[in-house]
Image: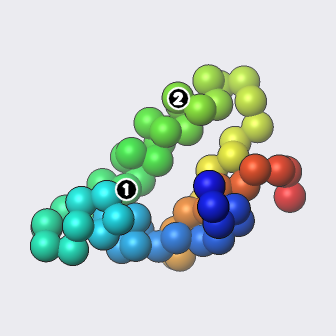
Amino acid sequence: MPHPRRVFSREELLGAVWGKDMHVEPRTVDFHIRRLRRAINGGHELDVVRTVRTTGYALDTEPL
C-alpha cells in the first residue's frame, strides 16, 4: 500500500513473505495472488491487483 502502482517481482514478494532462506517455488505467488483477488474483489469489484506479464504484480488503488 505505501507504493501504489509499483511492480513487485515474484522474487521480491517471496522474500518479503517467506524470507530469502526459504525455498518456495515462484509460482506459489500466483496461487496466493489468485486467493487475494477473490478475497478483495469478491467477483464484483474492479481488480486492484494488476498482473505485469513476465515481471510481477502491482497494486492499483485507482483504475488506469
Image spot of residue 62 (x, y percent): 83, 50
| Amino acid beneath label 1 | Val
Figure quadrant of residue 18: bottom left
What x and y, as percent, mark residue 6?
65, 71
Q: Measured from the top left, where is residue 29 in percent x and y?
A: 37, 56
Query: How many other residues sit within 10 Å of disc 1, few (<14), some (14-19) or many (≥20)?
Result: some
Any part of residue 15 in sight:
yes
Q: Measure the C-alpha gap from mark 2 to mark 1.
A: 15 Å
Q: Going 55% across and 38% down the picture, which residue do you hit?
A: 37
* Nearer-N-terminus badge (2/1): 1
Which quarter shows the N terminus? Answer: bottom right
Residue 60's quadrant in the figure?
bottom right
The amino acid marked with disc number 2 is: Ala
Does residue 61 appear left or right of residue 20 in this picture? Answer: right
- Determine which residue is flagged by label 1: 29
Q: Is residue 22 above or below residue 46?
A: below
Q: What number is the disc on residue 11?
A: none
Instruction: Give the labeled residue for mark 2.
Output: 39
